[in-house]
Amino acid sequence: MDTAKKNGRSDEILLEVRGLKKHFPIHSGFLRRVTGYVKAVDGIDFYIKKGETLGLVGESGCGKSTTGRTILRLLDPTAGEIIFDDPNIGKVDLAKLSRAQLKRVRPNMQIIFQDPFSSLNPRLTVGQIVGEPLEIQKAASGQALRDRVAELLQEVGIRPENMTRYPHAFSGGQRQRIGIARALALNPKLIVCDEPVSALDVSIQAQVLNLLEDLQEKYNLTYLFIAHDLSVVEHISDRVAVMYVGYIVEMASTEDLYYHPKHPYTEALLAAIPKPDPRKRTRPIKLPGDVPNPANPPSGCYFHPRCRYAEDICKVERPPLRDIGGEHWVACHFAERLQLQGVTRLNEIPLIELPKRQAPVPAASPAS
Amino acid sequence: MATTASKLPKVAKGKKQEDVGQIPQWKLMVRRFSQSKLSVGALFVLGVMYVIMIFSDFLAPYPHDVLDSNNAFAPPTQIVWGPEGPGIYGLKQELDMERFQWIYTPDPSVIYPIRFFVQGHEYYFLGLFPSRLHLFGVEAPPEANARVFLWGADKEGRDLFSRVLKGSQISLTLGFFGVFLFVVIGSIVGTASGYFGGALDNLIQRLIELIRSFPDLPLYMALAAALPLNVPITVRYFLITVIIALVGWTGLAREVRGKVLAFRSADYTAAAIAAGASHWHIITRHLMPNAMSHIVVVGMLSIPGAIGLETALSFLGLGILPPAVSWGILLRDAQSVQAVVTYPWLLIPVILLIITVMSFNLLGDGVRDAVDPYA
């Protein structure tokens, strides 16, 4: 899978995020004075290469979605740079663009949402929904618009006859496909997938993931894939970044990160993946305590109160995200020293000699 | 509830459900609305009332403001069948010296015939076209005291039927326009408040709180008392509409703001922003259409209140002023117990008012249930 995926991938960087911060003010009191900030995204750096998928994982509330939305300027960043390599304009810092300037860049970066119900306006037909970006950008109108919408719907596996129907007539998976068609309408380069499958059934998840992979290959798309399901991320990502309380703690190729994690938090996350080996009923590494409040994070390394390997320096100094070789970025003081446990490869799990079953029991349950 | 449940499968059987994914939401609403018989009935009643209102001058046999001391408190006229079709007797007026009441005795010697499509007093149909045509009238010499009072006469001898018809022109429309005005103001202000937020939102919300902090009735009375008295009836009509709207828009503006806040943070709005949509596009494409059903419901349910408010203001002498006539002014004549006991026909405007308000309430209920057709 990995070798096949890497074919379309180049070393050119499409999006580079430097020191991105998004703080939400906390108002309180009669005068609604600002009494503090929720540091949802607190200075993160990463890059995405053309044609690759960067998975962004982390617990709920760690700032994954905020990152995705800030990159698209659906939210205005507090600080930092978002450098996007626009095919027409060249490299631009999205964080500094005005509304009018942004409109020219927006066709090249689109978003797919998590909730297939709130992402489609119930008052519009599917044709209107998918055609809306074209209409806004005045890219097509009349018959040309209808043809393009039909083409897009076909692309995502919805019959074009359904253009005149309303979203409530579709299932969750179909709605998600409609949302994907809308994101594709303007031929974007980058698509932020904000947990696109986490609201779907497992069988539908696989269909939508395959669709996303097919589309990536066909149109050479670049994905920022936000998710909390580690197996989904492993399946689709070329590289993975792990977030913890508004901060990226580790970023590496999927292979490296899953089998050779260098950050204790990554190790704990990976240990929580259910193992396909019924004999190994080991408890996952226990993470004591809760995710810290992003309005009042701990000193030093944000992870130190929960970290098994924490030492004194962790309480004082926040480790920077640094490359320890082979594009493996880690924010841990002891990245080189620690020997951490990754996931077990499927073929390393020894098969069990199953005891020979008797002939099938005659009156088995009719349900199966 | 049981009846609706048993009726649902019937609807499902037909062709109706097959195209449910194809039809726009407003059509689903119409479909859902038509299932509520009570609301459809109310709509029909209101339709009839408004048609009657449009033709009220044509239907009214007499002008609403001509005094006739010979017929003060005349009871509803008895219709008799004469040689030339329906007709009436002349009335003889006597004063009961014991109770100081007028006593009317019909004089059966002559039957004055009722004619249809007769020429009478001049009026302007819809305020534009001069006409003298009336549906009916009594053919009688001027010296004979023979006038047809279908619903009796008031203390000045004016035909109550004609006055109720004339009053409907104000009572049925003023509340309507007042609500229309406040719905427009409330939607615009609420949308602006919810969408743009920030200082504008703060300002609007404090203004709303300020307006709402006044007690309603004294505020209405103060506003109404501030209206100039010597202005034409049309100007006064407009000013009272504005009073109804001024106080009414605040509640709607808050609700619309809440709705808009929710729709603004919906993912479909984010998708439109991600495609580079303008504020205007987002407001007209995503926010207003979704808020519209709520606005319509609030508007519908506010009409009866506004009609009642106009009536109340006129009743208190703060709204429409005589010689113009509205149902509220007619109710002033029915204030005293003596009037109600002795001349019960003076209560007819109350019955009409109740029918109107109830119909609007039932209609509003039906609309409210219909706006969520998927429920």
Image (spheres, coloured by chain):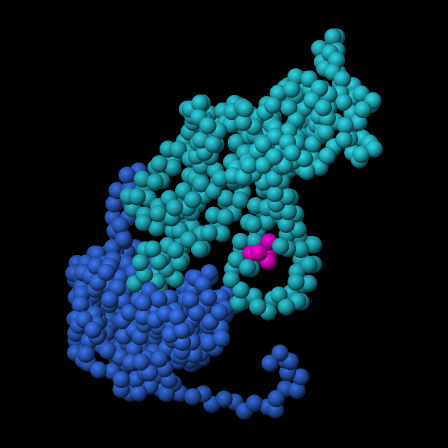
Q: How many marks?
A: 0
Task: Residue at 25%, 82% (x, y): give it.
Answer: A9
Residue B341: give x, y in percent of width and height. 71, 20
Q: Could you say which is closer to the camera, residue B122 or residue A127?
A: B122
In this rendering, the answer to whether B194 lies above or below B243 is: below
Residue A236: give x, y in percent of width and height. 34, 78
Indicate whether residue A44 is drawn in magenta: no
In this rendering, the answer to whether A229 lies above or below B314 is: below
> Which chain is painted in cyan?
B
Task: Residue at 56%, 28% (x, y): give it.
Answer: B325
Q: Could you say which is closer to the camera, residue B83 or residue B344?
A: B83
Residue A322 can be seen in this image: yes
Looking at this rendering, what residue extends furthest in the top direction? B97
Dominant secondary structure of the magenta stretch?
Answer: helix
Residue B342: give x, y in percent of width and height. 71, 19
Quadrant for the C terminus of chain B in the image: bottom right
Q: Is residue B60 left or right of residue A340?
A: right
Q: Which residues are magenta?
A: B29-33
Residue B69: give x, y in percent of width and height. 66, 17
Task: Residue at 75%, 13% (x, y): give it.
Answer: B94
> Which chain is painted in blue?
A
Q: Is residue B75 left or right of residue B164?
A: right
Q: Could you say which is closer to the camera, residue B189 or residue A256?
A: B189
Residue A328 can be seen in this image: no
Quarter of the view holding residue B95 = top right
Q: Is residue A89 left or right of residue A118?
A: left
Task: Residue at 27%, 67% (x, y): give it.
Answer: A106
